[in-house]
Image (cartoon, rainbow, N blue to C red):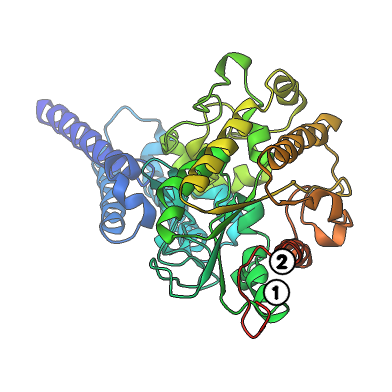
């Protein structure tokens, strides 16, 4: 009798050990143990560990039910094989489904869905649009590919490969800004506004000596663009920069007045991957959450990594717009003036532009959203007047017809063409490019 009791205790201890080991090798816990592996979930060593998990669960079940004399209900003692089979089937089915869904999410899910269900470190490195960067917080990933085609060059700018050393005889223009310069809703980089600007200048106006570089980065404010110009774009030895900014700086004003400071800490934080509970590593739960929104998941949304806590979503809400009214665009102006001062010191010509937007989208924003953008446009116009700089009054000339827009501030391909044409026309009519190939009068 004593031997039976000891055997029962021994079996229970073994089942407990196997259960503990199984939990340790649970795929939901693996990212905590091996964070570097979460980008390739359940690949390589992770797959082996999952097999160990299944073995440990089976071992726990075997030793637990081995002794028929344990104080278990009669139904359990008589049906333990069926219950064990059912339990193992459920466990194996769950983790097989997880494995399949993770494979699909990483390799085949649509781009828009990936940003909702995958963290940036879980995405294939070639599909990560952004990478952390010293001083700038983040920049474009030089290895990024869109639809299997390389979308960024080796310097981390959208477009074709360029040389750091400016070729002899080339007039180099660098377009600085955020997503409205990057042109994210146009999948072919050659149809982005900077690329189309180069095409128009070369083919319509004959400026075959012109090179235009797209240095726009989604999410950038004038804070990041100031750093981008000073620490990166100047290395390209540009002859001219085109500045196009407003909406992200307006978002930077949508913070509590006490946090609205010159270093932009009200909006920004240093690049940091959001921390999530271990159970959110389940792809089944993530996909259900994408449909039903029963928990907050940061995903691969850039703002979750670089924006201060609590404001990576729901921007331009009425509460935040009310905050913006208390925070005038003083730092927007100061940042632009700093860029102008650096450009003057390095003999780089600056072209300013008012910021275009449309009210014709299906979803309407508060009147103060549009008014806030106009406040930034007024700053731009005042700076152009004060320093005698060329100004493209793009807000005035850009049509608001929905065919040219993807949302309130971003352009479709045809809208990007009009943006490029407006700058090309200005540069040509104002004779801002010093020489034109094939023109004996130049």
In this rendered view, identify the residue nearer to me: 81 or 121. Answer: 121
Q: Residues within 10 Å of mark 1 (few under 14, many from 20)?
A: some
Q: Which residue is mark 2?
A: 424
Name the mark on residue 26: none
Q: Does residue 319 lie above or below 16 as drawn?
A: above
In this rendered view, identify the residue nearer to me: 304 or 18. Answer: 304
In this rendered view, identify the residue nearer to me: 129 or 227. Answer: 227
- The percent position of residue 134, horizontal first and vertical second, equals 36, 43
Q: Quadrant of the C terminus?
A: bottom right
Task: Determine the secondary structure under disc 2.
Answer: helix
Q: Which residue is mark 1?
A: 200
**Residue reaching furthest front?**
441
Residue 152 seen from this side:
yes
Q: Quadrant of residue 314?
A: top right
- The percent position of residue 213, horizontal first and vertical second, equals 54, 64
Q: Residue at x 10, y 30 (%)?
A: 3
Q: Quadrant of the N terminus?
A: top left
Give the mark nearer the N terminus: 2 vs 1. 1
Residue 282 seen from this side:
no
Task: Determine the secondary structure under disc 1.
Answer: helix
- The percent position of residue 365, horizontal first and vertical second, equals 82, 36
Q: Is residue 200 left or right of residue 437?
A: right
Q: Residues within 10 Å of mark 2 (few under 14, many from 20)?
A: many
Q: Does residue 163 lie above or below 56 as drawn?
A: below
Callout 2 touching callout 1 (CB < 8 Å): yes
In this rendered view, identify the residue nearer to me: 413 or 81. Answer: 413
- The percent position of residue 265, horizontal first and vertical second, equals 50, 25
């Amino acid at each position: 009798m004593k031997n039976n009791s000891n055997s029962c205790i021994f079996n229970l201890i073994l089942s407990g050990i196997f259960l503990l080991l199984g939990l340790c090798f649970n795929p939901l816990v693996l990212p905590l143990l091996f964070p570097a592996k979460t980008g390739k979930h359940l690949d390589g060593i992770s797959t082996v560990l999952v097999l160990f998990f299944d073995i440990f669960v089976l071992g726990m079940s075997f030793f637990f039910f081995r002794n028929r004399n344990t104080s278990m209900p009669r139904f359990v003692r008589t049906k333990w094989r069926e219950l064990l089979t059912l339990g193992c089937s459920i466990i194996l089915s769950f983790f097989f489904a997880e494995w399949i869904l993770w494979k699909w999410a990483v390799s085949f899910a649509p781009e828009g869905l990936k940003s909702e269900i995958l963290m940036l470190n879980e995405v294939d490195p070639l599909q990560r649009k952004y990478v952390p960067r010293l001083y700038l917080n983040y920049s474009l990933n030089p290895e990024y590919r869109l639809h299997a085609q390389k979308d960024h060059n080796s310097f981390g700018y959208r477009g074709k490969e360029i040389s750091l050393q400016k070729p002899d005889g080339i007039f180099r223009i660098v377009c600085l800004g955020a997503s409205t310069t990057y042109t994210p809703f146009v999948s072919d980089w050659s149809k982005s506004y900077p690329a189309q600007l180069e095409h128009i200048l070369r083919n319509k106006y004959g400026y075959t000596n012109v090179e235009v570089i797209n240095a726009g980065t989604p999410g950038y404010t004038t804070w990041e663009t100031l750093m981008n110009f000073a620490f990166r774009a100047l290395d390209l030895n540009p002859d001219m920069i085109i500045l196009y900014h407003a909406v992200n700086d307006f978002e930077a004003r949508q913070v509590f007045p006490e946090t609205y400071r010159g270093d932009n800490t009200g909006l920004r934080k240093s690049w940091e991957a959001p921390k999530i509970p271990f159970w959110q590593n389940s792809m089944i739960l993530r996909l259900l959450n994408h449909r039903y929104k029963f928990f907050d998941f940061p995903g691969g949304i850039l703002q979750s990594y670089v924006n201060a806590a609590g404001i990576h979503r729901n921007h331009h809400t009425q509460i935040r717009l009310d905050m913006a009214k208390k925070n005038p665009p003083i730092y927007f102006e100061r940042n632009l003036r700093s860029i102008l001062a650096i450009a003057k010191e390095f003999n780089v010509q600056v072209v300013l532009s008012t910021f275009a937007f449309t009210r014709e989208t299906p979803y309407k924003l508060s009147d103060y959203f549009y008014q806030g953008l106009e406040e930034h446009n007024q700053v731009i116009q005042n700076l152009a007047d004060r320093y005698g700089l060329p100004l493209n009054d793009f807000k005035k000339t850009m049509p608001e017809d929905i065919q040219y827009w993807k949302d309130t501030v971003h352009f479709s391909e045809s809208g990007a063409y009009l943006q490029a044409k407006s700058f090309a026309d200005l540069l040509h009519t104002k004779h801002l490019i010093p020489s034109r190939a094939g023109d004996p009068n130049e």
